[in-house]
Image (cartoon, rainbow, N blue to C red):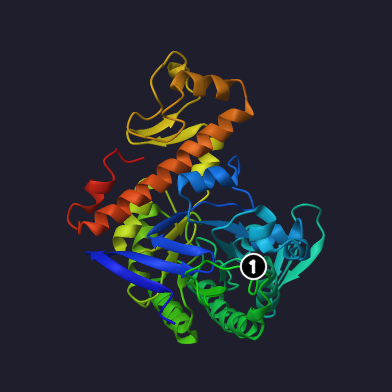
Amino acid sequence: MSSPFQTEKTAGSARLGRLLTAHGEIETPVFMPVGTLASVKGVSQDILEDLGAQIILGNTYHLYLRPGVATVRRLGGLHGFMSWPRAILTDSGGFQVFSLNELRKVSEDGVTFRSHLDGSSHFFSPESAMEAQIGLGADIIMAFDECTEYPADGARVRASMELTARWAARSKKYFEEHKSEVPWRMRVGHPQSGDVTQSLFGIVQGGMDRALRKESAERTVEISFPGYAIGGLSVGEPRELTREIIESTLEHLPADKPRYVMGVGTPEEIVEYASLGVDMMDCVLPTRAARHGLLFTSEGKVSIKQARYAQDSGPLDPNCPCRVCSRYSRAYLRHLYASNEVLAQVLNTIHNLSFYLDTMRRVRHAISLGEEARFLSTVWSGPKT
């Protein structure tokens, strides 16, 4: 079988590629909407399909707690459970456990943590995180890692990076021994998928230390994964530092494997990171911002809650062809939000996701044209947000 990932065109460091999964082919660079609990908040699966979402995310920590891996597995894995025919990626839950702060205890074996739902005690190890993700049945699953806080001293960052490397080796070992147990393996598949099944990606850590990031990348690549993620970003560091770490880390990742930056960013940031050679990105920002009335447009950010939009009969974004901008006025969207109507969150989310996904389509188009010097200006014509 040929490699599941192929680069088709480059423009400087940016690359246009295709990633084959058992539930369809993904054009990269790609933005992946976040559906933490097997649901992209406020948007049904048919609308996600209409918007052109090629792959969405689920989270192992949250799904493990509710409704439980056994339930999801019994109902056909995430694809069957949520009736989503396209690709899915699951995060191992490492970042969520990291976010629990006082509710967790890390050891060499794994992490003991208390549920944010009811305070009950649980334990995640590389092996149990792999078992859970295999049971959930996502197309792409992530090695169990420890996310380093920011700021952190050098000794703390090194210890965390080395723990992540050891956990990566344990994650791969368990996955290789049990990967045949994925729920959909023998029952579904994309016509072009052949024998493509579930894939395990490794995660590079190392805090904001370039040397430790290099070492983490080299050690993770040595273990050998079909794709590599850069984790531990968007944890409070300055955005300029985020970019610096991404750019320096990419140098140490294989050019023939997909490269995924976890948990980023604003519209102009995802364009910039794609220009550096990132293939996959995800972020809760478009959906979270939408619920707070913050909308992204080609003319900059719009806070639809502001009174100045109460009499505005124009579309939210005159340059956006989405179903919201083509039908509803700013005045109506402002009214819905001010009235606390559920429809406000739905329409706001649809627009923001459409804007992100359309931005990435324009990125791919720019790369296909061979744009380099004018890459950012070609894709992102609006002001910085």
Residue 21, how many percent across, how many down?
50, 68
Farthest top residue in view: 311
According to the picture, the residue beneath numbered tag 1 turns out to be 137
Q: Count the marks: how many?
A: 1
Q: Nearer the viewer, residue 35 or 300?
A: 35
Q: Nearer the viewer, residue 332 or 305?
A: 332
The answer to whether residue 273 of the structure is visible from this angle is yes
Residue 49, how many percent across, how many down?
51, 48
Residue at 71 percent of width and 69 percent of height:
105
Residue at 33 percent of width and 75 percent of height:
255
Farthest left residue in view: 373
Q: Report the amino acid beneath label 1.
A: Gly
The answer to whether residue 101 of the structure is visible from this angle is no
Residue at 57 percent of width and 34 percent of height:
346
Q: Quadrant of the C terminus?
A: top left
Residue at 46 percent of width and 31 percent of height:
324
Residue 27, how many percent across, how many down?
39, 60
Q: Quadrant of the N terminus?
A: bottom left
Q: Is residue 382 above or below residue 190?
A: above
Residue 254, how many percent across, how many down?
37, 78
Q: Is residue 316 above or below residue 45?
A: above
